[in-house]
């Protein structure tokens, strides 16, 4: 019964986003200017997540101080998430990814999902220190940890994915589909399906570490040094 209820909630969330896509699509058809060439298309990519208006996001960027680093960290991601960063992570050993500390504003959606899956397969411990941040696509990387901890003053931020494009209509449709991809990956990694109902439409959703616990994102809030309790999986024949 619980599984059926969870599935229904997930389907309702997808339906809501599908309706958003349909609405944007109709608006796109009505408002689109004539296309002069079928060869020239807008160049687009998922970039740094800045919600419409961007005031909360920008204010956080200006006011946040440098987070303290954990001595237990075996790897730190404190930059924009790009395919280059993902390639670097995918080439690392399980031991190097034992304890991954995050302090990132996010970045490329697919690269973040690839990193998250790598961390899950490595049995990684992910952590955001007090004063640290894990925004937008960074949250799916954090969700990839088998063990997930955060400091008391850590901040998490979720919002619709942002697609940069020369065509604003194309950017809005891409934003919706990028968000579906991001949320589905987070749910597959253990986030509560209620994230669909709570995600604000094209707005910032700021969470404290304790609020993130209720969402199934953070497992444990810590106030002192963190001890990595890495999960080892014995492989057949190893």
Image (spheres, rainbow, N blue to C red):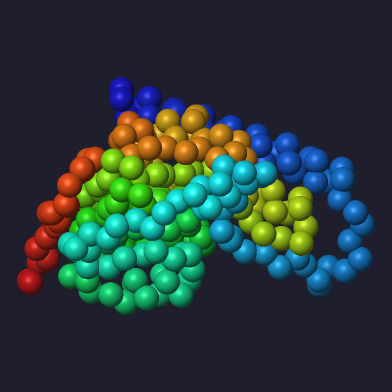
Q: Nearer the viewer, residue 27 or 145?
A: 145
Q: In the displayed structure, would residue 172 be above or below residue 40?
A: above
Q: Nearer the viewer, residue 174 or 52?
A: 52
Determine the image quadrant of residue 221.
top left
Total tally of numbered discs in the picture: 0
Looking at the image, residue 165 sits to the left or right of residue 3; the answer is right
Q: Position of residue 79 (x, y in %)?
A: 44, 66
Q: Quadrant of the N terminus?
A: top left
Q: Nearer the viewer, residue 2 or 31?
A: 31
Q: Position of residue 155 (x, y in %)?
A: 39, 44
Can you see residue 113?
no
Residue at left offset 9%, top offset 66%: 236
Residue at left offset 34%, top offset 71%: 89
Q: Nearer the viewer, residue 112 or 238?
A: 112
Looking at the image, residue 146 sits to the left or right of residue 134; the answer is left
Residue at left offset 91%, top offset 66%: 36
Q: Position of residue 25 (x, y in %)?
A: 75, 43
């Amino acid at each position: 019964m619980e599984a059926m209820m969870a599935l229904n909630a997930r389907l309702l969330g997808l339906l809501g986003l599908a309706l958003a896509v349909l609405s944007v699509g109709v608006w796109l058809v009505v408002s689109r200017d004539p296309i002069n060439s079928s060869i020239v298309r807008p160049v687009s990519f998922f970039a740094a997540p800045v919600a419409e208006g961007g005031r909360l996001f920008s204010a956080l960027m200006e006011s946040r101080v440098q987070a303290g680093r954990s001595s237990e960290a075996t790897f730190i991601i404190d930059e924009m998430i790009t395919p280059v960063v993902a390639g670097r992570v995918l080439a690392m050993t399980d031991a190097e990814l034992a304890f991954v500390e995050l302090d990132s504003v996010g970045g490329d959606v697919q690269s973040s999902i690839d990193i998250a899956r790598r961390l899950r397969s490595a049995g990684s411990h992910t952590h955001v220190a007090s004063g640290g941040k894990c925004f937008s696509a960074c949250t799916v990387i954090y969700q990839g940890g088998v063990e997930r901890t955060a400091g008391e003053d850590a901040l998490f931020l979720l919002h619709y994915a942002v697609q940069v494009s020369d065509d604003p209509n194309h950017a809005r449709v891409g934003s919706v589909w990028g968000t579906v991809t991001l949320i589905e990956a987070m749910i597959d990694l253990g986030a509560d399906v209620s994230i669909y109902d709570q995600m604000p439409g094209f707005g910032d959703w700021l969470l404290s570490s304790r609020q993130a616990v209720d969402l199934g994102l953070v497992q444990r809030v810590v106030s002192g040094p963190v001890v990595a309790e890495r999960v080892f999986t014995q492989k057949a024949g190893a």
